[in-house]
Image: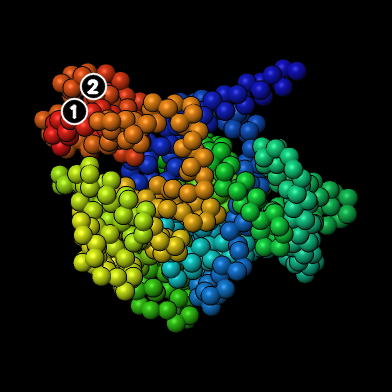
Amino acid sequence: MIILGNFLIILIAYLIIVSASGTLARFFLKFKLPLITGFLIVGIISGPYITGLLDNEAVKNLSFIKDISLAFIAFAAGAELRLKEFHGRFKTISWVTFGQLIIAFISSTFILFYIAEYIPFMDGMGKGSKFALSMLVATIFIASSPASAIAVINELRARGKYTQTAIGVTVVKDVLVIILFTICFAIAATFINGDTFKINTLFELIIGLIISVSFGLLIGRFLSFVLSFFINTKLKILFVILIGWFVFVLSHFITDYSELHWGFKLYLEPLLINIVASFYVVNYTKSRTEFLMLIEQNGMYIYVLFFTLAGASVALDVLQNYWLIALVLFVIRLFTIALGSSIGALSAGESGLFVKTAWMPYVTQAGVALGLVTIVASAYPVWGAAFETILIAVIVLNELFGPAIFKWSINKMGESHVKAEIPEFDGVREALIFGLESQSFALAKTLQEHGWLVTIATLRDEIRVEDYNGYQIVKIKNFSLETFRVLKASRMEAIIAMQTDIENRKICEIVYEHFGTRALIVRLNELSNVEEFRKLGALIVEPSTSIVNLLFHFAQSPVATSILLGLEEHKETIDIEVVNPEIKGLALRDLRLPGDILILSVKRGGNTVISHGYTRLRIGDVVTVVGSTESIEKVKLKFE
């Protein structure tokens, strides 16, 4: 009872630390570092060598969290292996993977073997043990981080052959790394324990891999069965995590039981089983979409649990003595990964720039590498602490520098599609409307009545511009970047797309990447395309639902809706950007504004600020105000 009470206290304390870690780690985003790095550092600070919030005994008691997290991380890695998406880049993916698995692995093994006497956890071992352990470390070296790679790709909205190759190699390689690790782990166990290597060992290993893959397919079918039930989403993710953890528990049990009762060691690899299961679900079942959604929505919770605990496991007393060797191993890994990747890309016939940057997506390490380190450290407690600490230090260095290197390479290859900066307001409100029809004319007329300069762009070549008096009509041939520059899109406060959804998407992509226009508005045709436009920062108007929403707001708040729609005579609502340095830092309550002006909200950096009388304005704030037309002009003059 006392033991259970102590365990619950440790668990509650750890969950409090994890909650703080999730918040504190966001501080590292300011330095362009990933959240995972923040989790590790918070874990290190919470560990036994700095604050002591988690001592060594507590970290040991929480080891089950590592298995649960690794099960989920394996599911996440397998979920990224989608065969249809990699078909066009199969040749390059194969060669770069081969280059890392063969060239990087072999070169790392021999370099590590020849400097083994300088590596603390290898010093004093026999040659056979040194070579076997060098193979294990080399295997961990070639592991990458699918989760980190995906995070960088999503952040940059990267697309292209380089990006596709990067994610393909990362995921395929990690599956093969686990198989290679299983082989090397069995060989290392033979040499390190002082046994002679027998052909039976290799046979047992092959049987274990076959059973692991078969078991993975079975777990995949069971996952699909569980996901087919109409139950609460939270219950589903709980079942998924428990199934993954069950694989770890059962694998460890079978390995121990076989050695004790069957006379041989049947080693099942739980990471491989879960990756195969996940791969099966996303490629061969109808549960793919839901499974991917569950992985995406819950990944960050698992990462904060795992990486915070991994950070707390770092033995700083060992690290302070061996930081130099950790740095040397980091450089060795960079060299061998670069060598293998470049030779692989060259063999696939890629261009010079591709070859030079081929290694950059694979610097980052995280879940899989840490999982493999944990497995080795747990198996060999005598030197496991030094092994774990030094290699986690290498992984942390990779995590610190990897994302920045990958970002640079994507930009260098021209595959980044991030949002352009919002241009400064020049004092003139201009709008660009794509589409020539009754609604575009009605919109143009309303905007012009409120002082906007409006341009209507159309693909219709048969029209006569001179027939449309009072409107600025421009005929265009396509939606190219050059067309937008001719239309002076960089000056526009608002761009409205009223074409087909395919054409609207092209418009939104160009505006998003090259102009950063403050108000990008789309009239939607198909409701299924909503998510695509939201990712591009567009404000979406869907005709079939908009009228229902409008009638609802009229019923719920007729006065406010009338003002917002401009139906109240001499009243209007408008967004005004603060560009006047004279009011910078002033609180709203200190502004001399007309009596009929009401400030509804203040938007800063894309986020709405809870505004009150003491809210101080900053340059670039967008203030939403409601009032009479005459008073709003005075406010515009003050702010702009």
The residue pinned by badge 1 equals 631
Q: Amino acid at mark 1?
A: Ser
Nearer to me, 121 or 396: 396
Q: Residue placed farthest to the right in the image? A: 261
Q: Are marks 1 and 2 in contact (CB under 8 Å)?
A: yes
Q: Residue placed at 42% from the left, 79% from the top?
A: 350
Vertical comparison of 596 with 232: above or below:
above
Secondary structure beneath label 2: loop
359 in relation to 32, above or below: below
- Residue placed at 42% from the left, 57% from the top? 157
Residue 505 in which image quadrant? bottom left
On screen, residue 610 versus residue 136, left or right, reads: left
Q: Amino acid at mark 2?
A: Asp
Crowd band around label 2 with a 10 angstrom C-alpha radius: few (<14), some (14–19), many (20+): few
Report whether residue 383 is seen. no
* Quarter-of-image position of residue 16: top right
Answer few, some or many: residues within 10 Å of disc 1's Cα (few below 14, many 20 plus, some between 14 and 19). Answer: some
**Left or right of 316 in this view: 240:** right
For the residue pair 429 and 320, the one nearer the viewer reads as: 429
Q: Residue 487, percent across and down?
A: 23, 63
Residue 204 position, x and y percent, is 79, 63
Give the camera-side residue of 602 and 325. Answer: 602
Q: Quadrant of the N terminus?
A: top right
The circle on residue 132 is: none
Q: Is residue 597 visible?
A: yes
Residue labelled with disc 2: 596
Dot placed on the residue nearer the N-terminal end, 1 or 2: 2
Q: Position of residue 207 (x, y in %)?
A: 79, 64
